[in-house]
Image (spheres, rainbow, N blue to C red):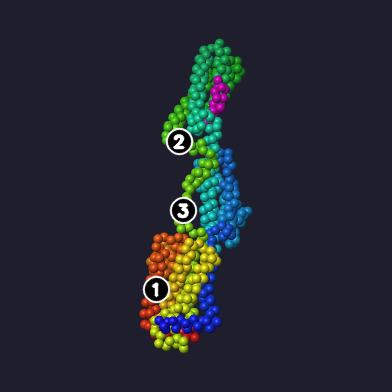
Amino acid sequence: MKNIFKIIRADLRHIKTNVIALCVIIGLTVIPALYSWFNILSNWDPYGQASTSRIKVAVVSVDKGTSLEGTELNVGDTIIDSLKTNNTIGWQFVASSDEAIEGVYSGEYYAALVVPENFSKNLISFLSDSMEHPQLKYYCNQKANAIAPKITDKAKTAVQQQVNQTFIDTIVSTIAGTGDSVIKDADKETGSLMDAVINRLTSARTTLSTYDVILNSMLAITDLTSSISSSSNSAAPQVYTQLQLQQKQLITLQALVNGNSSESLNELSSALSNQMSQIQSIMGSLTELYSDMNMDVADLSAAIKLTSGSLTQTKELLSDLETKLDNAIDTLNTITEQDTYGLLSEMLNADANTLGDFLSAPVNITTEQVYAVKSYGTSASPFYTILALWFGGLILVAIMHTPVHPAPDIPADAKRYEKFFGRYFIFFAVGQLQALLITLGNLFYIGIQCYHPFLYWVACAFSSFVFTFFMYSLTVAFGNIGEALGIVLLVIQVAGSGGTFPIEVLPNAYQIIYRFLLFPYSMDALRECIAGMYRYDYIKNLAFLSIYIVVSLIIGLFLQKPFEKLNHMIERSKEKSGVML
């Protein structure tokens, strides 16, 4: 032990009396901290509004719009208006689609969103016979940057959600608004859209019964007129009177039909109205013709038969319409007796805007954050902190000598293990200074979130000790090969420690070696301090990390001698090359 302390004092004296060595030690202490701070700050909030608002995305709408139940609908304009109040992306509102697309190809914009001219029309095409799926055109420059497309893709998704919400809002508001107008015009006591519709249909059915009585009367008059016309010309005044009476009844029936023509079953109602118009025209012509013919009844027999046939067809149409109305009323009455009718009635009687908002987003997700972290930079800090500590240990073994060379103030009889521990002290001390500076900078300069600052420093200090001891042992045992192994381990751990991406998404090879690496245990210990502790995870991570202390002792104390000749041979070969240190 005495020789170990002598070696430590000698190393400290040499550094103290050598300005260059002191400057190198300061540099070795500061550089890893700078490496950590720069990386954490550069990743502090890459997905926040302050950062993403600088990413330019062109937007243009050439949507011509359409109409729905008298309501003008232009979803393209709605999208543009919505994005003008959205600052999460640097939206660039350009004049034409060609300008937007060209900007993506030139690199002026990371992406472009184009709303085509038939977008609104296609959006409601499901109401017509030919349904067209609406398409937003999205152009993304994948060459410009690896992360930017991921950010702009989120913006694309947000626009798509906005379109869906606008669509549902518009459709529901139109339907609910129509229902509301029907209710206002219906019986005020019912207060129900379904009851109002049933009342309308029942009223129409009563009116049709009146039509039926009138048609039967007209058919009877027509039969009488036909009989009179067949007898003799002496009955001419009676024929003329009956023709005028039929024409008046037709005018009355036509007015009744026209007065009740939205109701539902409008196709059949329209046919009935047209039939009435045709009969009225025939009867008017018959009256004029009969008058012009000087009331010659015999010549009108064929014409009256034609009128009777038209009235018969009209009665058949009327009977068909009555049957359809009866079926419709029965169906609606059956629906009102079902449990689901209450829910439907409440929906249709609800406020149109409220209903539209609900249906466009029927499910709300309440997020309960577990171990909440306030910024992406804080989340990324464990990886960059541990990476900086490993990097600090690596430059130590690359710049500082691990062998203890003979000197007046170093005992000549110092044993191998005494030299090993005596020289390691300077590596340990500089490593601890690195860990302390990184910890203080992360906590007080950068201001990362940390619930347990003292334990955070303990984790950094312990990680630095394990890292420096492990790389020191590799270099003592294997020389330059040990330094190279430290670099190889750095590369492997950067890629496969789960520092940036979850280990589950990495190749299988990394998932296998993951548990044998040092970085994961150190990072997890820091995460416990940053976001909150779970039982004994902090202690377990440091315990797993301490296994490498034993591994380092075995390498440094027991493998040094067997590889000593090989290391000397490599050193001589390097010197003979004339180009290697």
Q: CA distance from mark 3 to mark 2?
A: 35 Å
Q: Residue 260 at x, y = what percent?
A: 54, 28
Residue stretch rendered in magenta on the structure = 249-266
Q: CA distance from mark 1 to mark 2?
A: 72 Å
Front disc: 1 or 2: 1
Q: Which mark is residue 368?
A: 3
Residue lying at 47% horizontally and 47% vertically, measured from the top left: 363
Q: Earlier in the sequence, mark 1 or mark 2?
A: 2
Image quarter of the N terminus: bottom left
Crowd class of label 1 (few under 14; some 14 to 19; many from 20; radius 10 Å): some
Q: Earlier in the sequence, mark 3 or mark 2?
A: 2
Q: Is residue 429 above or below residue 132?
A: below
Crowd class of label 3 (few under 14; some 14 to 19; many from 20; radius 10 Å): few
Q: Helix, strand, or loop for circle 1?
A: helix
CB under 8 Å between callouts 1 and 2?
no
Q: Residue 44 at x, y = what percent?
A: 53, 63
Q: Helix, strand, or loop for circle 2?
A: helix
Q: Which mark is residue 342?
A: 2
Asked if residue 528 can be seen in this view, the reply is: yes
Residue lying at 57% horizontally and 15% vertically, measured from the top left: 241
CB under 8 Å between callouts 1 and 3?
no
Q: Is residue 214 above or below residue 384?
A: above
In the picture, measured across the screen, residue 421 lies left or right of residue 23, that is left
Q: Which mark is residue 549?
A: 1
Residue nearest the observer in this picture, 440 or 323: 440
Residue lying at 51% horizontally and 32% vertically, measured from the top left: 191
